[in-house]
Amino acid sequence: MIPYKQMTAEELLTEKNRLDEAYQEFKGQGLKLDMSRGKPSPEQLDLSMGMLDVLTSSDVLKCEDGLDARNYGLLDGIPEAKELYAEILGVRTDEVIIGGNSSLNMMYDTITRAMMFGFYDSPRPWKDERKVKCLCPAPGYDRHFAISELFGIEMINIPMSPQGPDMDLVEKLAAEDESIKFIWCVPMYSNPQGITYSDETVRRFARMKTAAPDFKIIWDNAYCVHHLTQTPDQLLSLMDECKKIGTESRVFIFASMSKISFPGAGIAAMAATKENLSFLKKQMSIQTIGFDKIKQLRHVKFFHNAQGVYEHMQKHRKVLEPKFQMVLSVLEREIKPLEIAEWHAPNGGYFISLDTMDGCAKRVVALCREAGVVMTEAGATYPYGKDPHDSNIRIAPTYPSVSELEQAMELFCLCIRLASLEKLLLG
């Protein structure tokens, strides 16, 4: 294959006419494939079906502390579940709150409470500040950005690098502007790029100076056990690094079992200092008496401990690794020689992030949709849905079967090539 930028205008037009015919053939197939969200496949969900059998009506549903899991109590979760998550997240059990099924819900509630009441170290509720801003590593997780936008929090784009967010810019902005109150982070196998923050990036987060006395790091460690290779990435503990310096009050860690057990019936967790959690639990005690302890007990009896979770995730890896490898192999074959897109091969997580030529992402997604394959909307990985380069596309390979995924990727690559040819022909 010849790189498109080395072709003459006549060669580009000939290539486009050939691909137009292939595209029409795809449209005639009546495809209906949805790759817009990172959902576990039915095969992955089947891996956890045994969880439904670990409790029976004859069981005595008592927790470690003797509390009846069927009744009220334990606002912050059963001891066994807190021990499980403390081991996974590398924190103490008294630094963990177990929530419902959704870590996103816990993050939403945390920002809501900050707006209404501030944190224990806040001068005032955030709603009473003249302006509230946050830092957004981008491309990033669209639902993080949606929370900020809902509350009218001004979002500032932070470019990503192979080591994580541009820390020079993060440090500069956070030190200069007291209205910058927090940063969104997916530190391990980031959504969508699959980047794991380097040790130095984590250390810089711990020691950075902030103008806001109540600056927070929202550390959404959603993919901390979602490895795809035998040589997984390693993430330095932010809490440990902050404790060395005395900045641990800025840390809020979140995770969930949504892509480990069942997305609609997992358990989520939040980790922070005892002072932070004590302040939040006073507000939580008015919101709820406690979350589903029977579900928490079911997870503990199924996984037993962190090692049980790690072994379970190896089963997920066997399902997912062939899908990711297939996506990457198609991109290597169909796109790499043409030099019209770039991507990162992740060691874990749920997505592959691809950057087209500037100005082509929306066109690629539209062409795919017209031919029956729904992708994540172009721009969704940036605050306000505005990709300044119109280049980033998030690929979600997890839900379709391998055969469906291969068909979708053939179309996707065809659409990248068509959009690129259109762009080059327009000059």
Image (tube, rainbow, N blue to C red):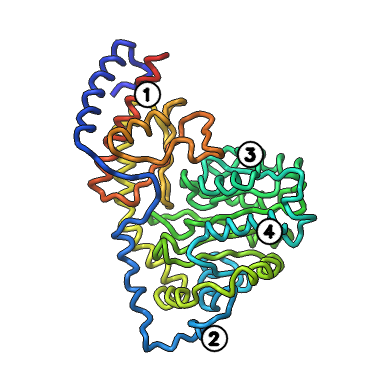
Q: Which three-letter amino acid code belongs to the residue tagged 2?
A: Leu
Q: Nearer the viewer, residue 171 or 23?
A: 23
How far across and down, in percent of the image, does residue 216 sit? 67, 54
- Name the image quarter holding the N terminus: top left
Give the SS element for disc 3.
strand
Give the SS element for disc 2.
loop
How far across and down, in percent of the image, does residue 215 sit? 71, 52
Q: Which residue is mark 1?
A: 420
Q: Label 3 vs label 4: CA separation?
A: 24 Å
Task: Give the label, 1 or 4, closer to the camera.
Answer: 1
The residue carrying pointer 2 sits among few (fewer than 14), some (14 to 19) or many (20 or more) residues within 10 Å by Cα, namely some
Residues at discs 2 and 4 in contact (Cβ within 8 Å): no
Q: Which three-letter amino acid code belongs to the residue tagged 1?
A: Ser
Please tell me which residue is depicted at 37% across the width and 15% down the height of the picture.
Answer: 425
The residue carrying pointer 1 sits among few (fewer than 14), some (14 to 19) or many (20 or more) residues within 10 Å by Cα, namely many
Residues at discs 1 and 4 in contact (Cβ within 8 Å): no
Q: Label 1 vs label 3: CA separation?
A: 29 Å
Q: Which residue is mark 3?
A: 156
Please tell me which residue is depicted at 62% across the width and 52% down the height of the picture.
Answer: 202
Q: Which residue is mark 2?
A: 67
Residues at discs 1 and 2 in contact (Cβ within 8 Å): no
Name which of mark 3 and mark 4 comes first in the sequence: 3
Q: Which residue is mark 4?
A: 242
> Is residue 160 at all visible to an observer of this figure?
no
Q: Nearer the viewer, residue 231 or 380?
A: 380
